[in-house]
Amino acid sequence: MTATFPNTFSQFTLGRLALKNRILMAPLTRQSADADGTPNDEMAAYYARRARGGVGMIITEATFFNDELGCVGYLSQPGIATAKHVAGWKKVVEAVHAQGVPIILQLMHGGRVSDPRCLHEGERAVTASDGQSPGWVLYTDTDEEKHNRGISGEWPKVTFPPARALTKDEILRIADGFAEGAARAVEAGFDGVELHGANGYLLYQFIHPKTNLRTDEYGGSAENNVRFAKLVCERVRKAIGPDKIITLRLSQDGVDDFTGAWPGGLSYARAVGRALADADVDALHWSSFAWKDNRADDGETPMPEAIRETSGKVMIVNGGVADGADAEQVIASGAGELVAVGRPLFAHPDWPHIIRSGETYAWARFDRKYVIMPPNDHAYSYPPKLPKVDWDPDLSKRRTADWMR
């Protein structure tokens, strides 16, 4: 029998971790944790089902690591800041490991694109340079989302608040916060962590020249723009040691700029790669809507391939991978060693098994309903249900000090 997609289903060693294939589950925001950020049984059922479906490794949804300096990005976002959070994640990790699949935790600081209701009284959002994102919190302006989550009452469009530039001391504190969160992730049993430097969040705000206007050592060039991210990598590595995986996610676009592009195009991408060549990470992770779309006119080499070439790092490629042929092309073309699949796994947790069969399959179109109520492993949570949400529509409200207790 001829192997279907032989590159995609070949084994790969990432750091010191043996992967059974090249398919990773991409981090996917769901806002499905308990109100205090604790992962719940529904989340264990969700991740276990995708592990059963045949992926080589799972990267979790973005997770906040403390409640300082505006770290929390979303209501109902999972955390790794308390002992209760660690205990909740342990259930998730054990459910995934039971299927023989490794799992790493994505750590995120929201920066200027945090929901204002996640800030405390008198607290301002933080970023690379003073400013305000022109965007708004995802999905909060649709009646469909309101219906799907069972929310009644007013349903506001939540715009992002003004943000101030971080001081150098605050940059160091946030780097330490990432490291502390990574140590708690290892305590929960994770095989490593991903550091979120993409999609509009804080590290992205430093890496992207449009949002980083600093004139100190943290801005003004590709080398300086990635300095904060490299500092985080360094401190996380010190916290979790050489045996755990560290990946760093990168992108041109963000939750507040879906068509975003790096000024300088491929030239800037290559400079970012060179600057990250000595970063203490096991892989870089390129996030996009379509991995071959550079949104630049200075060359045809795909961005992830260019960064891979200049950094010398293992590259995870995400964006525009809908079926087995797409995954195979990423690896065969040299753009990356690993493929991160996102949206297809919401509706089709068996995506890896399906494409390996070689059979034609009627894929479901992406729909937010699958994000909120995806197919789950009922061994971990039955009947299927998400926590009841009570998101206050008053955008002037701020967190109370005891919200995680």
Image: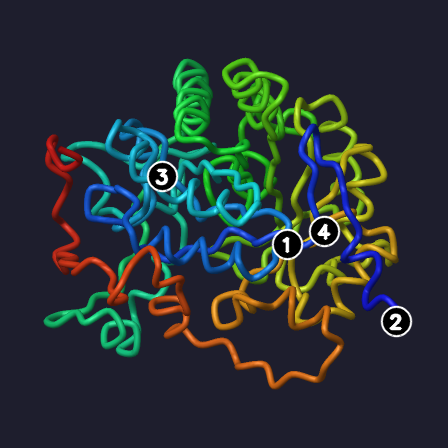
Residue bearing mark 2? 1
Determine whether label 2 and label 1 are within 8 Å by CB.
no
Amino acid type, mark 2: Met
Task: Give the label on residue 89, or none.
Answer: 3
Question: Which residue shows up at 37% across the image and 36% down it?
Answer: 90
Amino acid type, mark 3: Trp
User: Along the polypeptide, which appears first: circle 4 or circle 1?
Assistant: 4
User: Along the polypeptide, which appears first: circle 4 or circle 3?
Assistant: 4
Say above or below: 5 vs 115. Answer: below
Q: Is residue 212 left or right of residue 380?
A: right
Q: Secondary structure at mark 2?
A: loop
User: Along the polypeptide, which appears first: circle 3 or circle 2?
Assistant: 2
Where does residue 67 sit, x and y in percent of width and height?
27, 30
Amino acid type, mark 1: Ala
Depth check, mark 4 against mark 2: the one in front is 2
| Crowdedness near tag 4: few (<14), some (14–19) or many (≥20) residues, C-alpha within 10 Å | many
